Image (cartoon, rainbow, N blue to C red):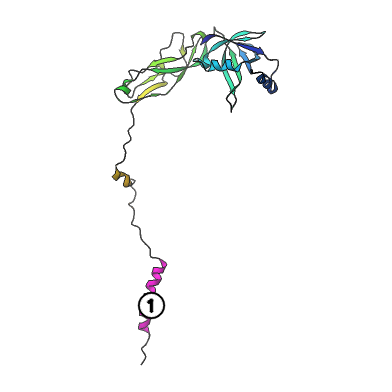
Amino acid sequence: MRTDITVAAEARASRGKNEARRTRRTGMIPAVVYGAYKDPVPVAVNPRHISQILHSKTGHNTIFNLSVQGGENSPVMVVDGQYDPIKGHLLHVDLKRIDLAKRLRVSVPVVTHGEPKGVKQQGGLLEVVTREVEIECLPDDIPEHFTIDVTELLIGQSKRASDIPFGASIHLVSAPDTVIAHCVALKIVAEPTPAEAVAEPVAEGAAPAEPEVIKKGKKEEEGAVAEAKPEAKGEAKPKKK
């Protein structure tokens, strides 16, 4: 989406890690401007201005003017960025020149509108599957977002990318049958009764559990043998006359 925002930039004489560190110490960050059949140009920009653009409603689809001191003034878009892995600060950005007369591909967010009948009347749940679609259009025709009406959705029905109301100049690049949102039934999990909770289920085809056999200990066996020995000994010994 084209805006009237202008970001000032300063040309950089060289590249490299040392030059990038010196640029950041001044409160700026290194950037590169390329595209539109022109040579890449290293510049320095204010990270706060770029962050404000990236956090706006149009985000990466924002087309703004880049005014290089003593150089070009071109419409550009942020196509890539490098962030500090710990602090999250913006460290570097790639800016692409935009030809306003040439069509380009961008991804645009999709938002839903309304409460589905499947939720309101049937107790279902609206599930959003896809949150953005890819389109092709002129830079001035890039929308902030698309809105799709889900009011008439019943359980089992869905809205697809082909159902989004596109303008005449916008071409859908994403697959037309891509599901944007659908209405599904809620799954009810029945809680087990106390009796079911105590009884363990037996798998189908499994053999029934055998009763546990209690084995006698060594001491019990020795005791039984000791009781039997005197009897046997007495029978074998002859009586004295």
The x and y percentages for residue 213 are 35, 60
Q: Secondary structure at mark 1?
A: helix
Q: How many marks?
A: 1
| Three-letter residue code for mark 1 | Lys
Q: Residue furthest top?
A: 101
Instruction: Name the residue: 66% across, 12% down.
Output: 10
The picture quadrant where one finds residue 160 is: top left
The question of residue 220 being in magenta is answered with yes
From the viewer's perspective, is residue 227 above or below residue 11?
Answer: below
User: Left or right of 83: which side holds 152?
Assistant: left
Instruction: Name the residue: 67% across, 22% down.
Output: 21
Q: Nearer the viewer, residue 52 or 130?
A: 52
Instruction: Name the residue: 67% across, 20% down.
Output: 25
The x and y percentages for residue 174 are 46, 18
Magenta-colored segment: predominant secondary structure: helix
From the viewer's perspective, is residue 195 above or below residue 223?
Answer: above
The x and y percentages for residue 180 are 41, 21
The x and y percentages for residue 3 are 53, 9
The question of residue 187 being in magenta is answered with no
The picture quadrant where one finds residue 96 is: top right
Per the image, the residue denoted by label 1 is 229
* Neighbours of disc 1 within 10 Å: few (<14), some (14-19), many (20+): few
Q: Quadrant of the C terminus?
A: bottom left
Q: Residue furthest bottom?
A: 241
Q: Which residues are magenta?
A: 210-238
Q: Nearer the viewer, residue 3 or 40?
A: 3
User: Left or right of 179: which side holds 78?
Assistant: right
